[in-house]
Image (cartoon, rainbow, N blue to C red):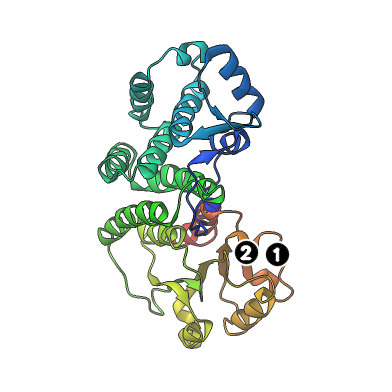
Amino acid sequence: MLETEQIFIISVKTVVRTNYSIKDLEHLTGIKAHTLRIWEQRYSIILPKRTKTNIRIYSDDDLKKLLNVSVLVNKGWRISKVAKLTGEAMNDSVQDLAMSASHFPSQIARLIRATIDLDEPLFTEILNDSINKVGEKETFSKLIGGFIYQLGVLWQTDAIGVAHEHFASNLIKQKIYSALDRLPATIVSKNNPGFIVYLPEREMHEIGLLYIHFILKLHGEAVVYLGQSVPLDFIKPLFRDKNKWKGVVSIWTTSPDNDNRDNYWHELSNCLDGIPVFVTGIGTHNWVPRVNGSQIHISTDVRSLSEDLQSKIISKSVS
């Protein structure tokens, strides 16, 4: 199962890899290295090049093919049948699966192909098709969430670079911004308290935060969206009138860092006077706040954060 939040965490790489080891492909496709070797020998599913020391080397085309193979096999196809398909037939089969409203793995595989090829028309077509079939909420949560998790894996192995990351991220942001523009905005006041939504200073990974912004507005909540890299001193004056706020939402990935997290939380919580804070991000994993622990709600990922907000605050507002 793909976890949405890790997804929304991407680190920048400057070198783009075009060759992969068998362990890289195992990590990227979910197909075990042992299984890949058997498929190569038995079905010639992939014919990798080899180094002078006989180590397998795989190409971008091999990666894209195995992503398709993984989708079809996980859908129940026999590998013997998959191995007989031409490249075009395999693409068509994955595309047919993607036409299913709920088959997100095949759509994710196609988004990865579009990203590697920098194919904007295909990328946009996949997103639009999903939005038309299952709506924006499901598309943002499951399709985009699952895709960006895979995108993060591609980064970690240097399979894609800054250009690919910006390509995909900007197209996704356009869709979320468009959805936000169609939702009514409401003003935060004592009679209509709302949320402050922001990323800490030097934190730039915004897609997850935009999704939370969308979920809050979708439920009619008033939101003050501050976006990326907001210094804490800029936020403090907003809490002078504490009756205007239901909560604060943030994602901590690289900031605040391990050495400063406790101090950051101590400083933030001291000016909140009981206003609840909802956070997620790898910066919160295995972290236990030393002070005011009951005031902060830590979720494992962005999807869980969305669910926590809906169950703990939004649902109470509706009832």
Q: Is residue 195 visible?
A: no
Disc 1 crowd, CA 10 A, few/some/many (<14, 14-19, 20+)? few
Taking the image as shown, residue 117 lies to the left or right of residue 294, namely left
* Residue picked out by circle 2: 283
Figure disc tally: 2
Q: Position of residue 246 (x, y in %)?
A: 49, 71
Q: Quadrant of residue 1?
A: top right
Q: Are marks 2 and 1 in contact (CB under 8 Å)?
A: yes
Q: Quadrant of residue 166?
A: bottom left
Camera-near label (2 vs 1) is 2
Q: Quadrant of residue 197?
A: bottom left
* Residue picked out by circle 1: 287
Residue occupying image coordinates x 25% and y 43%: 121
Disc 2 crowd, CA 10 A, few/some/many (<14, 14-19, 20+)? some
- The amino acid type found where label 2 is placed reads Gly
- The amino acid type found where label 1 is placed reads Trp
| For residue 203, above or below residue 242 | above
Give 163 or 153, whichever is nearer the viewer: 163
Mark 2–mark 1 Cα distance, whole angstroms, equals: 8 Å
Q: Is residue 3 visible?
A: yes
| For residue 34, above or below residue 134 | above
Residue occupying image coordinates x 61% and y 59%: 282
Residue occupying image coordinates x 64% and y 63%: 284
Toward the front, the furthest residue is 52
